[in-house]
Image (cartoon, helix red, strand yellow):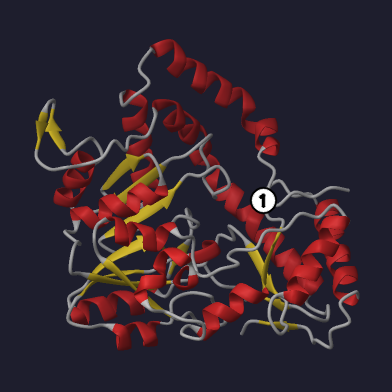
């Protein structure tokens, strides 16, 4: 039995006719850039998140860039963030001329260690950029209290966390802005790239909307140097069809995560993600396979591949050790928890339409793969 990390074809079984109709309506309308359907999606997404405004754009990366630009973060500024994330988190900071300052993550949650964040704040710190990684929400009450004490802006990276909540409040509503990605494998996925920014600040919303269209306040009137970063009407139509299904899709992910946790709890050689975290949307189910370096983890991944079980490593090289950031001076050992996670993490197949048979095949395959490593590990779970 083959099991993919995610299977986008399955959604077509339930949403296919509605998606076909929505896409054809846009094609026949002849309005492919902007227009009614984009506005409808922005209104619907803002309502679903619980903010006054949602500004669509062409990717989660651009969402971060537009947000930082609108907050006037730029040359000479520093933004504190995590190196255990997709590269775009830091890349957006650099793209606006600021400097990313990396701090280590909590070994249990894989999210920013807020104690270390406070210690890293300096005279040039302008903003915090927390990441709700794998769909798990950061403690935003603590994060916002810290930001307010030091007069900092907060940009939430919600790329993997559409539909996640902290303290019953959606991510993307806590900070000055929330930045979402609609890459096809996300909780809410388009049929290509797409992104959105949420805020309750009308001035920020106006600025981000202008920046997304070449800094244009009105036709051929440009107030700033901006970008060509518009969400296509076709993508907006796809997202409008999928958005009402988001709660049920996340519920399915949560059920899979609970089942994985129960089935894997007594398998030697694993450290499981913590269960029972309220508001976790489980964009990924990431286990740790401890060892000295990545050798054991890679052996397990290869053994699973031989059984038709496809897994992904998020992320094998942390951002601070990427060649592109060599000039910042972070060396091996500078972020020990992040570096250990990069050697140990493995993302198991996780998508709403995963079947019980597929999930059981993953569990059985993982047990066999771990037995084959011969490593004297003990089962565990992040506290």
Mark 1, other Cα within 10 Å: few <14 / some 14–19 / many ≥20: many
Residue underneath mark 1: 351
Q: Is residue 25 above or below residue 237?
A: above
Q: Secondary structure at mark 1?
A: loop
Is residue 82 at least partly visible in the picture? yes
Q: Which residue is drawn at the image coordinates 17% and 81% (left, top)?
A: 123
Residue 110, horizontal then vertical, whole percent: 53, 75
Q: Position of residue 136 (x, y in %)?
A: 52, 67
Q: Residue at x 70, y 31 (%)?
A: 13
Pick the front one: 163 or 75:
75
Q: Is residue 327 left or right of residue 253?
A: left
Residue name at image x 57 percent, y 21 percent: 20
Instruction: Left or right? Give the position of 124 relative to 170.
Output: left
**Residue 68: image location, x then y, percent:** 25, 57
Q: Quadrant of residue 122?
A: bottom left
Residue sitting at x 77%, y 64%: 301
Q: Nearer the viewer, residue 89 or 350?
A: 89
Q: Quadrant of the C terminus?
A: bottom right
Position of residue 96 measured from the top left corner of the image (x, y, whole percent): 25, 56
Q: Is residue 275 visible?
A: no
Front residue of this view, candidates 251 and 348: 348
Q: Quadrant of residue 176?
A: bottom left
Question: Considering only vertical position in the picture, is 95 above or below 130?
Answer: above
């Amino acid at each position: 039995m083959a099991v993919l990390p995610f299977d986008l074809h399955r959604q077509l079984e339930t949403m296919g006719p509605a998606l076909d109709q929505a896409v054809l309506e846009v094609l026949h309308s002849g309005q492919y850039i902007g227009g009614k359907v984009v506005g409808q999606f922005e209104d619907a997404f803002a309502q679903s998140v619980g903010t006054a405004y949602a500004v669509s754009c062409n990717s989660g990366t651009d969402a971060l860039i537009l947000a930082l630009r609108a907050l006037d973060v730029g040359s000479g500024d520093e933004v504190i963030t995590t190196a255990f994330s997709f590269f775009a988190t830091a890349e957006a900071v650099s793209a606006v001329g600021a400097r990313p300052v990396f701090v280590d993550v909590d070994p249990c949650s894989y999210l920013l260690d807020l104690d270390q964040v406070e210690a890293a704040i300096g005279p040039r710190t302008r903003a915090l950029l927390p990441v709700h990684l794998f769909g798990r929400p950061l403690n935003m009450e603590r994060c916002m209290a810290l930001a307010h004490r030091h007069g900092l802006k907060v940009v939430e990276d919600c790329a993997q966390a559409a539909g996640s909540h902290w303290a019953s409040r959606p991510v993307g509503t806590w900070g000055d802005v929330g930045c979402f990605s609609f890459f096809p494998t996300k909780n809410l996925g388009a049929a290509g790239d797409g992104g959105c920014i949420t805020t309750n600040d009308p001035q920020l919303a106006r600025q981000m909307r202008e920046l997304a269209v070449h800094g244009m306040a009105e036709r051929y009137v440009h107030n700033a140097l901006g970008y060509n970063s518009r969400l296509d009407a076709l993508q907006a139509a796809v997202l409008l069809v999928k958005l009402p299904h988001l709660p049920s899709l996340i519920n399915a992910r949560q059920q899979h995560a609970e089942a994985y946790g129960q089935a894997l709890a007594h398998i030697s050689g694993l450290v499981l993600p913590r269960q029972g975290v309220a508001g976790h949307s489980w964009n990924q189910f990431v286990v740790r396979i401890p060892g000295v370096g990545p050798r054991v983890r890679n052996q397990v991944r290869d053994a699973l591949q031989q059984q038709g079980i496809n897994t992904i490593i998020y992320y094998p090289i942390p951002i601070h050790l990427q060649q592109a950031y060599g000039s910042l001076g972070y060396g091996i050992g500078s972020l020990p928890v992040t570096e250990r996670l990069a050697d140990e993490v493995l993302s198991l197949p996780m998508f709403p339409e995963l079947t019980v048979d597929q999930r059981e095949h993953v569990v059985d395959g993982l047990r066999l793969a771990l037995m084959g490593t011969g490593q004297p590990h003990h089962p565990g779970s992040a506290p």
